[in-house]
Image: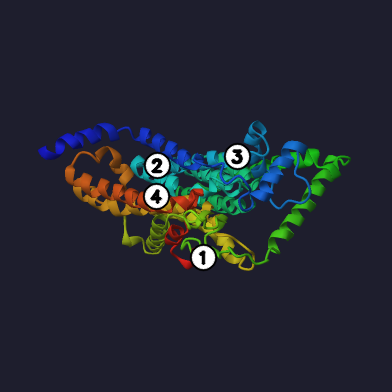
Amino acid sequence: MSNFSFNYNFLKLHFNKYFLISILIIILGFAIRIFNIANPKNYVFDEVYYVKDAKSLITNGVESGFFVHPELGKWLISLPMRIGGLDNTWYWRLSAAIFGTICIGLIILAVWKLLGSLILANLAGFLLAIDGVGIVMSRVALLDIFLTTFILAAFVALLYNKPSWVGIFCGLALGVKWSGGVFLILFAIYYFTKQILFYIKQKTFIQHLKTSNFWHRIVDFTLLPAFVYLITWTPYLLYRPEIQNLNIWQRLTNLAQFHQKIYNFHINLNTGHNYQSAAWQWPLMLRPTAMYYNQSQPTATNGHTSVVEIISLGNIFIWWLGLVCILYLILNLIFPRLNKNLNTKTIILCLIGITAGIGPWLIFTNRVIFQFYSIIILPFIIICLVTTIYSVLTKPFNEFYNLDNQPVNQACFDNNLFKNKNYFLKIFVPIVSIAIIASLISIYFYPVWVGLEIDYQKWLKILFLKTWI
């Protein structure tokens, strides 16, 4: 123990400042997302639609013509453009980078509340900071990163038992994409099921139904998100040219008819696309979306061909290990005796985001969908991953402290980490090893996440699966 004490005490002194590590992880995530974000200088994938819509919002106060998603996401894209100009790629992608960074802070809060360990929370934040899907979707002016941020914020509010904020954030998510509504439904089911079971156990369920608090919660999950969603359509109701001479009820009727047109568009979107990917393929990373590709011709001086590509390919270590962890949690949900360190509530909270994010797309099999939609499940895959780590590492923790399978957060996981060399090695080393392996893989794929110019042969080595090309 004496040989270990110097370095060990040094680590203890510094790693007591877990919040400082959280801040550094957030800064790292932002730096990765903002680096070289202005390139390429032209539209990337569906930026051609959303940036043009954002420009219309700036110049006309409303989107022109027919559009297929609510306006809030385009408003968020437009905010930096109002400062830096309509044709500057750096400004039209800035909002995505900011919201992608906010996601890192939110997942740290979520895991800290869920597991009670800021060490594991920081691991989750770090994995989100360096994952390819998270990086790519935070560097392009598409809508999904805004949807993910609001859903993750609603999940944090759910964990902290703030139903009003769950309703507000889900309403904002709906204002970006309608798929946010599935999360609202499952969050509501979870919340009310937990409440009902609690009051039934207390034998006060009927009395609870008569209280104003119960009906306030109903409003939080129904009328409140609907009201917030309607507010996101304010520019349409105020500035849409063809309804300027209509009264408020006629404008609302027009808005309802416009919603019907959007709905018809989405259910009939079945034209094939080279990069479409079925939802079951997303966690396997079988067909990531090529956002941008440019191949130069070989020159007389060097005879080499170079490639610049941006592809929404995740860190395969995080995604594939995360998939194993999801299966592990499902087994523990079905067979609770496998691991007493996990309770049913924790497992359901881990899996709820996966179910809401991927479930609907498994139903609409005829619709064209893309792998980059999976950004919405990425935080929850990482949460499943660190929760599995929590479950596995609880055993040596409890064996050392004779805690008889008490949850880690009750055993002060973070504070006791540095009290014993053997325990430190059993717990901290695996966590750091996972972070190092994920980092090395991210470095390997980094050029095709941020659009760096690389040799064609190197590009082929990076994208080693045929379905990635």
Real-space Cα distance between discs 4 and 2? 27 Å
Q: Is residue 129 left or right of residue 436?
A: right
SS of the residue at dot 4?
Answer: helix
**Nearest to N terminus: mark 3 or mark 1:** 3
Task: Please tell me which residue lies in front, 415 or 106.
Answer: 106
Identify the residue under disc 2.
112
Identify the residue under disc 3.
212
Real-space Cα distance between discs 3 and 4? 54 Å
SS of the residue at dot 2?
Answer: helix
Q: Is residue 35 left or right of residue 22?
A: right
Residue 33 lies, in percent from the top left, at 49, 42
Q: Nearer the viewer, mark 4 or mark 2?
A: 4
Identify the residue under disc 4.
443
* Three-letter code for the amino acid on which mark 4 is drawn: Ile
Which disc is residue 45 wearing? none
**Nearest to N terminus: mark 3 or mark 2:** 2
Identify the residue under disc 1.
280
Residue 17 lies, in percent from the top left, at 32, 32
Mark 4 Cα shell of 10 Å, populated few (<14), some (14-19), many (≥20): few
* Three-letter code for the amino acid on which mark 2 is drawn: Trp
Q: Quadrant of residue 246?
A: top right
